[in-house]
């Protein structure tokens, strides 16, 4: 049985509903799954209930976007009290900022001569935390681009003419949000950041590192596992499953961590709450 602690639903930028994700996890022999939607915990109540009915443990999680020196750094929060009042206030604020950012991106696309509105984007975002993938879907639907990746490469990617930065959130702030909600914090997919940023996150008090991830090769897995042991951190990992246009449909059930890694997290949670 597999343990996957990094997945997404259609409450952020995933394709599947909470029910569809848990049913797929059951098909792929996943015994424990964390839902870590971007700036949202809206999938968790439904997913936990369905997971209980199917014999799958659902761990409450979230993925927060931060930055260091204008470089995006994503932080996973796991074992959260997803009904924590302060957490919900922060997430509501982040979701509002996501909406404002989407409006700015749409305006830039209009200035580039493309007829797209926020309503076009909201058809795909609906009640989820709006993000660039929803804008990419709208651009495909309107014929502005021919595929998902073209939207990022030509327009809304980090160096694109319609790119807009997220609101600045420091990793320390994200770590405090997660800790105050009773959770553990992990550097998500560290292969996307440089070693100096990883060192800064360790100094800031991160609880662990996502060692297992589809973007990591064998060398990187060994490297990050070595850092985990060197600094007495926790090891996390998962598929970062979104489904659909991310071409990761086969990743769910392919990337997972050991029971001993999960046990170490649970021991840390017990010590923190003692």
Image (cartoon, rainbow, N blue to C red):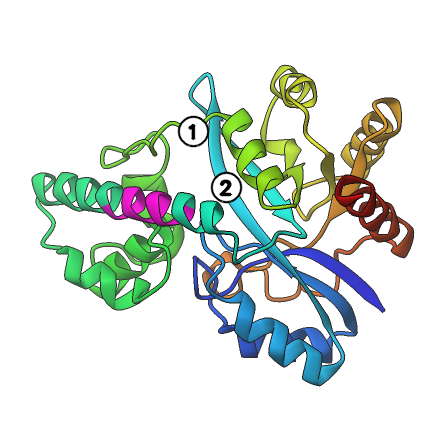
Viewer-closest of 10 and 206: 206
The numbered dot on residue 64 is 2
- Mark 1–mark 2 CB contact (< 8 Å): yes
Residue beneath label 1, please? 169
Q: Is residue 127 left or right of residue 69?
A: left
As drawn, is 202 to the left or to the right of 143? right
Q: Based on the displayed image, in which of its 4 quarters is residue 192 positioned? A: top right
Tell me residue 1's x, y (percent): 85, 69
Q: What stretch of residues is rendered in magenta?
A: 91-99
Q: Main secondary structure of the magenta part?
A: helix
Residue 170 image point, x, y percent: 47, 25
Identify the disc placed on residue 178.
none
Tell which residue pokes out farthest to the bottom in this image: 53
Residue name at image x 33 percent, y 32 percent: 167
Residue 40 x %, y %:
45, 55
- Distance Cα–Cα, label 1 vs label 2: 9 Å
């Amino acid at each position: 049985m597999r343990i996957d602690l990094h997945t997404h639903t259609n409450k952020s930028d995933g394709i599947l509903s909470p029910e569809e994700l848990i049913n797929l996890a059951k098909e792929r022999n996943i015994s424990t799954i964390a839902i870590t939607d971007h700036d949202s915990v809206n999938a968790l109540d439904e997913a936990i209930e369905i997971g209980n009915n199917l014999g799958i443990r659902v761990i409450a999680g979230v993925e927060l976007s931060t930055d260091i020196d204008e470089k995006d750094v994503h932080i996973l929060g796991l074992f959260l009290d997803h009904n924590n009042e302060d957490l919900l206030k922060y997430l509501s604020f982040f979701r509002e900022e996501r909406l404002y950012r989407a409006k700015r991106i749409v305006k830039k696309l209009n200035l580039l001569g493309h007829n797209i509105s926020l309503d076009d984007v909201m058809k795909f975002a609906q009640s989820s935390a709006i993000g660039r993938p929803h804008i990419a879907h709208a651009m495909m639907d309107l014929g502005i681009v021919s595929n998902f990746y073209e939207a990022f490469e030509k327009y809304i990617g980090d160096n694109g003419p319609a790119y807009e930065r997220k609101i600045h959130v420091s990793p320390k702030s994200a770590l405090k949000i997660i800790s105050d909600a009773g959770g553990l914090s992990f550097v998500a997919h560290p292969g996307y950041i440089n070693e100096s940023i990883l060192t800064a996150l360790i100094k800031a008090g991160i609880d662990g590192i996502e060692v297992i991830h589809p973007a990591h090769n064998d060398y990187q897995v060994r490297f990050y596992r070595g850092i985990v042991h060197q600094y007495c951190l926790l090891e996390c990992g998962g598929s970062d499953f979104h489904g659909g246009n991310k071409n990761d449909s086969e990743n769910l059930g392919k990337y997972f961590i050991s029971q001993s890694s999960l046990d170490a997290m649970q021991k840390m949670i017990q010590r923190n709450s003692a």
